[in-house]
Image: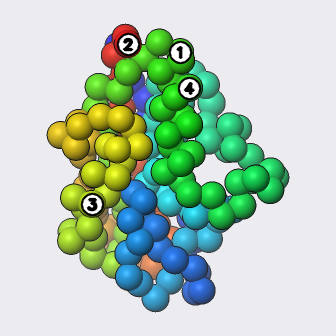
């Protein structure tokens, strides 16, 4: 088996949609990035790539490549999963945490799990998503940005 860890962070800005785990969340700000800046999907992608020692999504989908401008991060995650499978591995489970002072995410957690599971080709029961604040501390606590951590377990395919 293999274990991977992923981490991503993006700045919150006005005039952008907030996309987390492929779900558009109503909020006055969104995440700034070359793609749709979905920190949750990016962290999951990085965990999967890390588990098979293939780097990170920045290497696979560079922000210098115009093909990825505004890209749907779930589509990128699907490509990552394909590479993981080609390397001989299957997703056992994913556990992720979104760190954001606001908005409250409880009402969208199941939708995020469903979308991530579909992109990874696994059951919803194999994907956990949690959300937490940092009690007003740091850049996430001050509302400057949102971060996400993810770990995954890969099993031989």
Quick one: label 2 or label 3, which is nearer the N terminus? 3
In the picture of the structure, the residue carrying the numbered disc 4 is 83
Name the quadrant of the C terminus.
Answer: top left
**Residue reaching furthest left?**
125
* Separation of marks 1 and 4 at Cα, in angstroms: 6 Å
Quick one: label 1 or label 2, which is nearer the N terminus? 1
Q: Residue at x 30, y 34 (%)?
A: 122
Taking 129 as reference, is 81 above or below it?
A: above
For residue 136, side relative to residue 67 (left or right) = left
Q: Residues within 10 Å of mark 1 (few under 14, many from 20)?
A: few
Taking 72 as reference, is 100 above or below it?
A: below
Asked if disc 2 and disc 3 are in contact, CB closer than 8 Å, the reply is no
Task: Judge whether residue 42 can be spotted in this image.
Answer: no
Q: What SS does tag 2 mark?
A: loop
Q: Residues within 10 Å of mark 3 (few under 14, many from 20)?
A: some
The label shown at residue 157 is: 2
To which quarter of the image does residue 15 belong? bottom right
Quick one: label 2 or label 4, which is nearer the N terminus? 4
* Separation of marks 4 and 3 at Cα, in angstroms: 25 Å
Q: Residues within 10 Å of mark 2 (few under 14, many from 20)?
A: few
Asked if disc 1 and disc 4 are in contact, CB closer than 8 Å, the reply is yes
Task: Judge whether residue 71 can be spotted in this image.
Answer: yes
The label shown at residue 87 is: 1
For residue 118, side relative to residue 46 (left or right) = left
Taking 43 as reference, is 88 above or below it?
A: above
Taking 53 as reference, is 142 above or below it?
A: below
The label shown at residue 111 is: 3
Depth check: give the residue in front, 129 or 133: 129
Name the quadrant of the N terminus.
Answer: top left
Q: What SS does tag 1 mark?
A: loop
Depth check: give the residue in front, 65 or 43: 65
Q: Where is residue 141 drawn, in percent x and y?
A: 40, 74
């Amino acid at each position: 088996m293999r274990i991977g860890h992923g981490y991503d962070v993006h700045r919150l800005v006005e005039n952008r949609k907030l996309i987390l785990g492929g779900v558009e969340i109503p909020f006055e700000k969104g995440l700034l990035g070359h793609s749709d800046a979905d920190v949750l999907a990016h962290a999951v992608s990085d965990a999967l790539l890390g588990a098979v020692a293939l780097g990170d999504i920045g290497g696979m989908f560079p922000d210098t490549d115009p093909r990825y401008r505004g890209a749907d991060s779930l589509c990128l995650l699907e490509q990552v999963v394909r590479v993981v499978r080609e390397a001989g591995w299957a997703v056992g489970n994913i556990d992720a945490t979104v760190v954001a002072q606001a908005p409250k995410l409880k009402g969208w957690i199941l939708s995020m799990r469903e979308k991530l599971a579909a992109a990874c080709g696994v059951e919803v029961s194999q994907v956990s998503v949690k959300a937490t604040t940092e009690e007003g501390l740091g850049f996430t606590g001050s509302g400057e940005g949102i971060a996400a951590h993810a770990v995954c377990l890969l099993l031989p395919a």
